[in-house]
Amino acid sequence: MASPTSPSPQTARFQEKREAILGAAALLFNERGVKGATLSDIAASVGLVTNSVTYYYRKKEDLAKACFLRAIAAIDVITLAAATQPTIQARLTHFFQNYALLLSGMELGEQPPLVYFNDLRALPSPHHDEVFSAYTDLFRHMRDLLKSAETVGLSRDDLNARAHIIMSVANWMRAWFWRYEADEYTRIAGRIVDVLMNGFSGGQSSWNSAQSEPDWTLATGNRETADSFLRAATLLVNEQGYRGASVDKISAKLNVTKGSFYHHNDNKQDLISECFERTFSVVRQALSLAENSTGSGWERACAAARVLVRYQLSENGPLLRSSATSALPDQEHRDRVRRTLAQLTERMANVVVDGMMDGSIRPLDPSVAAQLSVGLVNAAAELTRWVPNANPDNAPELYVRPIFLGILCSPSGA
């Protein structure tokens, strides 16, 4: 006789089918965005009809919420386990090693796929409220990884900014770990922890708090009206993905009519393409200035990161999140955008190599250092979520400095 606590065959089948639906949904949400994927597509990918999926999840938003909560829970398990380690370095090592194992398992098909957090804000209420509450709890648990006697002198803003770095690095890993074979993931995770803990500085290189880049002016466009459409579209795509950023919503954000939209833009797809080009143009300008300016590689790498983070938080920002590529309407466009992003990241890696050659940057993995720098810039647009007081003036000290000097560096001015 079966134990009273043993699941019945029907319950086991229910759980198995639900897991299959969640896995298929995660893949399609990652590929097309929450707004772009349909219940019928998800059903077809697991050999079901739409009505069968609605038996488990009545609406697509219910399914998306379940996918987000499932991903948050999986990462939270790793975070809470890491918190039991005695030191910050041991905690970060434990977290990133085990997170890398999770990503490796997904790549090899040994772990179920998890949804990206790109479209979390595209969920309507009350779905968004529940998911964001869980995501906030995950952030707090990641912040706890940084609490010890070593960080007792950090302000709340400092600690939150550094926790945002940790969370952003973890989220960003999924965007570039495809470059490596799955059995390398834990080794690369070790290099990530090395950069986080020890920063970039080589020997005598130090952070100059008074340093600025007065001549590093990043042009955004020639026509004020056209640039306002680009900024509005960028904000909406960052929040709700390509399909969530409708012509109606872009027009409403600028308080103009749809007729005005089409007077200035041929169609939404071309406008979003211009958003990517605008973002890449700004990043390209900063990296070109870093490549061609005087000073050590360390000084130029720091300057490039500072100027781009300032831009993100300025009235000209934000830049389009790289994760927006997942919801672009065609594969060719996605591939082209991802290729450009990879090329720009390589340019940052070359600046890091310059610093290693002149001794201003210590020996480290330049590709990992470049990815962390680019990911830092990419995530800066969301810094105010956790640090409401962050602005173009203080963000370089709160947020850029800990990457270049190490996550445990003393607060600015200490």
Image (cartoon, rainbow, N blue to C red):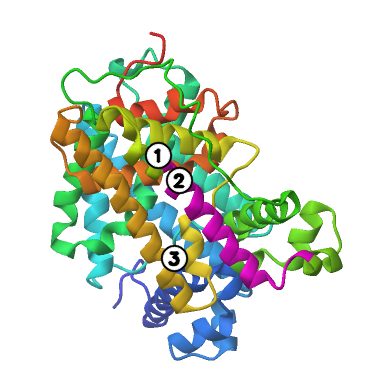
Residue 128 visible, this orientation: yes
Place of residue 146 in the rendered image (x, y in percent of width and height, measured from the top left): 34, 28
Residue that numbered label 2 is attached to:
285
Residue that numbered label 3 is attached to:
337
Place of residue 292 in the rendered image (x, y in percent of width and height, measured from the top left): 34, 39
Which is nearer the N-term, disc 1 or disc 3?
Answer: 1
Which three-letter amino acid code belongs to the residue tagged 3?
Val
Residue 335 sits in quarter: bottom left
Which is nearer the N-term, disc 2 or disc 3?
Answer: 2
- For image coordinates 23% across by 36% down, the residue present is 195
Look at the picture and state if 201 lies above or below 57. Answer: above
Q: Is residue 396 left or right of residue 146?
A: right
> Marks 2 and 1, Cα distance to the nearest angstrom?
6 Å
Q: Is residue 298 left or right of residue 275?
A: left
- For image coordinates 31% across by 27% down, the residue present is 299
The stretch of residues the image draws in magenta is 264-286
Please say whether residue 344 is one of the residues in the magenta stretch: no
The C terminus appears in which quarter of the rendering? top left
Residue that numbered label 1 is attached to:
289
Which secondary structure dominates the residues rendered in magenta? helix
